[in-house]
């Protein structure tokens, strides 16, 4: 008499999970792996071939300058762009029109032209006006009932003797880049602020919040999550456009490469290294921005899957 063995059920494969796995594999950054392997292969193949070791050392000295200029200029642009975005929401007609004029005018000027203008035209003019004002302050006296006579001789002397050459070209370039990007960042801020629903603003007003409290506690925290990825992408653009400071003699990556290539006529090797250096920097930042976007959108991705 045979005993029937219990039937073993084979678990069925969920086709939906299989499709999700295939979709994730197809979306993986395989291009990044290929590009990283090519960069590593190139670096290993030329690291001991003349003149690449010398070029790498020369360009490496400009990496710190490039990163420093980009960080400082972008930090200033972030603050200035936020101020401009908030002023564009002002109910004052004159303030709105003046700030809008600033944004449209700056956005219509190429970054290189603006860097030249700030470094060679605007800043020298401001220094010249400061010299004239300093000469007037040297002989100016302010008489107050309690404090007596106040002189501005020391301040006037400093302003009168201040020279254009005292303003480093790196700071001139930073001012130009900051003003150029502040106009674009203000539009990103404005889009993020407007993404917050009007109902939340009305609810905050009904609770007795002031306009500043509503902006600080309700609008800006939500807008920050929206504008964070575009701000990261704009920093990558700022890093690349920081090469424009080389036209003012700032010793960044591009300028270091130009100097070495002009003295040795090894343009092919030098600009291979310059391009590779910028590519590594921008790819690293792009990967960081992608990671940040994935972290912010992980909830939406689960719903889509």
Image (tube, rainbow, N blue to C red):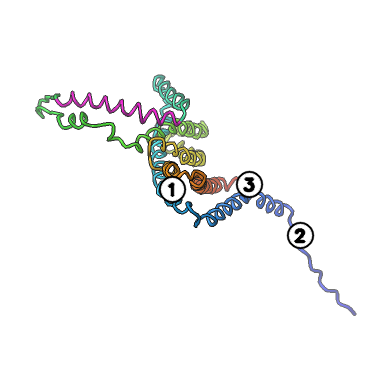
Vertical comparison of 255 with 17: above or below: above
Magenta span: helix, strand or loop, mainly? Answer: helix
Closest to the camera, between mark 3 and mark 1, is: 1
Provide the secondary structure element on which disc 3 rests: helix
Looking at this view, name the residue that lies furthest to the bottom.
1
Residue sitting at x 53%, y 46%: 286
Q: Residue at x 71, y 51 (%)?
A: 19
Task: Count the marks.
Answer: 3
Q: Is residue 162 visible?
A: yes
Q: Given this view, does label 2 or label 1 mark the residue nearer the observer?
A: 1
Say the numbered circle drawn on residue 12: 2
Q: Toward the viewer: 77 or 84?
A: 77
Q: Is residue 128 on the magenta stretch?
A: yes
- In the displayed structure image, the side of residue 173 where residue 19 appears, left or right: right
Residue that badge 3 annotates:
303
- Is there any visible trace of residue 288 in the rendered image? no
Q: Nearer the viewer, residue 116 or 44?
A: 44
**2 and 1 marks in contact (CB < 8 Å):** no
Residue 258 percent across, percent down from the top left = 44, 41
Which span is picked out in magenta?
Answer: 111-138
Q: Residue drawn 48% across and 31% down?
A: 187
Q: Position of residue 142 (x, y in %)?
A: 13, 25
Where does residue 157 sit, x and y in percent of width and height?
17, 30
Give the CA separation, mark 2 to mark 1.
58 Å
Q: CA distance from mark 3 to mark 1?
A: 46 Å
Q: Earlier in the sequence, mark 3 or mark 2?
A: 2
Count neighbours of disc 1 (C-alpha within 10 A) and say few if under 14, some if 14 to 19, many if 20 or more.
Answer: many
Residue 78 on the magenta segment: no
Q: What kind of element bears circle 2?
A: loop
Asked where in the image residue 248 lies, by quadrant, the reply is top left
The residue where tag 1 is placed is 59
Please report whichever mark, 2 or 1, sits nearer to the chain's N-terminal start. 2
């Amino acid at each position: 008499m045979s005993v029937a063995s219990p039937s073993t059920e084979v678990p069925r494969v969920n086709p939906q999970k299989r499709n999700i796995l295939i979709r994730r594999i197809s979306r993986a950054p395989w291009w990044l792996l290929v590009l990283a392997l090519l960069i590593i292969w190139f670096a290993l193949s030329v690291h001991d071939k003349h003149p690449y070791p010398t070029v790498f050392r020369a360009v490496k000295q400009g990496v710190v300058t490039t990163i420093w200029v980009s960080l400082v200029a972008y930090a200033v642009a972030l603050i200035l762009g936020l101020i401009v975005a908030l002023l564009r929401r002002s109910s004052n007609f004159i303030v709105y029109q003046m700030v809008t004029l600033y944004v449209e005018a700056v956005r219509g000027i190429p970054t290189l032209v603006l860097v030249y203008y700030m470094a060679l035209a605007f800043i020298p003019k401001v220094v010249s006006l400061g010299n004239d004002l300093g000469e007037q302050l040297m002989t100016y006296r302010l008489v107050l009932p309690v404090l007596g006579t106040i002189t501005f001789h020391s301040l006037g002397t400093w302003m009168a003797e201040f020279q254009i050459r005292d303003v480093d070209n790196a700071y001139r370039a930073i001012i130009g880049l900051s003003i150029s990007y502040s106009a674009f960042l203000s539009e990103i801020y404005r889009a993020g602020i407007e993404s917050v629903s009007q109902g939340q603003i009305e609810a905050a007003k009904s609770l007795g919040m002031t306009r500043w409290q509503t902006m600080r506690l309700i609008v800006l925290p939500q807008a920050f999550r929206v504008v964070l990825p575009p701000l990261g992408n704009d920093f990558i653009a700022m890093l690349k456009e920081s090469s424009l400071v080389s036209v003012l003699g700032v010793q960044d990556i591009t300028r270091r490469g130009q100097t070495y290539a002009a003295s040795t006529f090894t343009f092919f090797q030098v600009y291979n290294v310059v391009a590779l250096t910028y590519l590594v920097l921008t790819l690293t930042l792009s990967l960081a921005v992608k990671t940040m976007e994935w972290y912010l959108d992980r909830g939406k991705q689960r719903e889509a899957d």
